[in-house]
Image: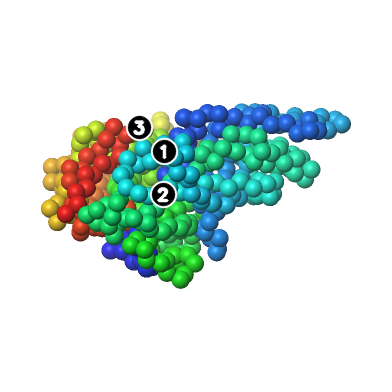
Amino acid sequence: MSNESEKRLQTTLGGVSEITALTQRAINAAMIKMATDRPEVTHVDCKTKRGDSLIGTIAEPLVSLKVIGSNRAGLEYTARFGSGTLHFNYDSPLDFDIKDWVIAFDVPLDKIDLEPDSDEYLAVRAAINQPGDFSLQSLFLAFNSGGIINFNEDHCDFNGADLDDDDKNTLGGILAKWYIDEGPMTERRNRTIGYSMLTSKPSSVNQQAPTFPPTSLKFQTYEYKGPGQTEATEGIPAGDNNVLLYLQMTDGEPFPPADILLYSGNFASSATELLHTLNHATYVWIKHADIDNTQSPNWEIGVGDSSHSASPDFFHWIKQDNMLWTWGNPRNDDEQYYKHENDAGWAYGRLTVDCNVTNSMSTSSGSNVIRVTGTSDVKVDSSCGKSSPYAPWATDYGVHVWLSWDTTITINAVDAGGLKLVIDLDEDNFRVGNDPLYYNSDGGFGPTKSDIEKKQNGLADNLKSALQNSALQSVADELQKNLDNAARFVVPGLGVFKYKDPMFNDNGDLFISVEYQ
């Protein structure tokens, strides 16, 4: 069992009735959407009495959850400016172009009960579309002047501008004035992270299962620890799997006495994290290449991960659109491309090695099938010889070997409740091929055709075993365990609810019908 699965299986609720986990990644996606839908929240236009001013546009308002230490009710807010000008109205005025500046400062989280029958309450209640007698709470960013003025300089980037302490204090003051006193963030709804529902009459909300609706709630941040990771990580994107937990008690039960839920395992994981295994397995790279000996250019191809296991971002799938993720392009020239020539008097050597990987993962609206395909391609071209008029010789060869694969992962509902993943492991879905070996030799020196055939066949064998050694069935098992546990965290009551008709929507989200039994 992988560390990823172990950490999810070890997670405990600590006496809390229900927990909903919201990843940092999801929060930032929502913030970017809000900035897109309400562009006014990204426009900064603020001026002090002295005449200092900042006029600009924030390209990305993002947050990093605080998960290290005892403070589990805060985050770091990051404003990444896409354009703008900062003006200091000194005796000798200073102006700075703030394009690509990053300002980061700490912000606590807070919550407040919405006033019944307020416009906000009615809008949220309509969005929830839930009958019954319940109240609503807003969880929001509580900007304060101390946090903004004393921004986190280690996480800021002034794009090479030389600011002294007075400049930084003035900049912090302008931002505090904007976020707290003047700008659109003075409206709490523009800085709301999410809403939650509470009820003192649970049977009015869910008559069939009155122990399901939350009767009390609190929140905290919570860390994620990846495979081989012993300490929590914060930041963007390093902390994207850290989560904001909504801790909920039901049926009027009190919260456990502990102030916070301590780490016991991971609440966050994703199918794409586990599908990184495919990218690890199919990565082709140049283990060694040289033409130090012009009579025999030397090369060796690595199949599978080289040294990137400690850098998980290297194998992350890249989202192209709502239905398509890819990995492998552009080529990593440091490890996947080599071209060199060596001329030593009459002797010469030429060697080009070109490795490429193109993997993709896709689905379609209304489907419950994920298609996963890929190609690992290796080309080697070499020539060596001696142009001496006394004993000339020349040997040229070309090798082209590839692995291509095309399989599916199907998500089905099962009668017992939950979801079942089925991966198609038919051997016909995985194929290793090669062009006929090109070999030409004149003069009887250099590598023999037999030598090159052995290298070509050995490379083909390594590619053929790459996916077998990656244990694709184990990947499917990991995905299954991931879903089994995600159901417990996201949809409490597993075993009481039956999942039906899983399918992807137009946005690439997996929709699941839930039927109470």
Which badge, 1 or 2, is on the more N-terminal residue? 1
Question: How many marks on residues?
Answer: 3
Disc 3: which residue: 321
Q: Nearer the viewer, residue 433 or 111?
A: 111
Q: Is residue 100 left or right of residue 314?
A: right
Residue ID at (69%, 39%) = 177
Mark number displayed over residue 135: 2
Q: Which mark is residue 122?
A: 1
Instruction: Kindly state the secondary structure of the residue where label 1 is placed.
Output: helix
> Coloured how?
rainbow
How far apart marks 1 and 2 lie (CA) works out to 11 Å
- The answer to which of marks 3 and 2 sits earlier in the sequence is 2
Closer-to-camera residue (233/108): 108
Q: Quadrant of residue 98?
A: top right
Q: Position of residue 217 (x, y in %)?
A: 43, 57
Which residue shows up at 21% across the image and 44% down it? 513
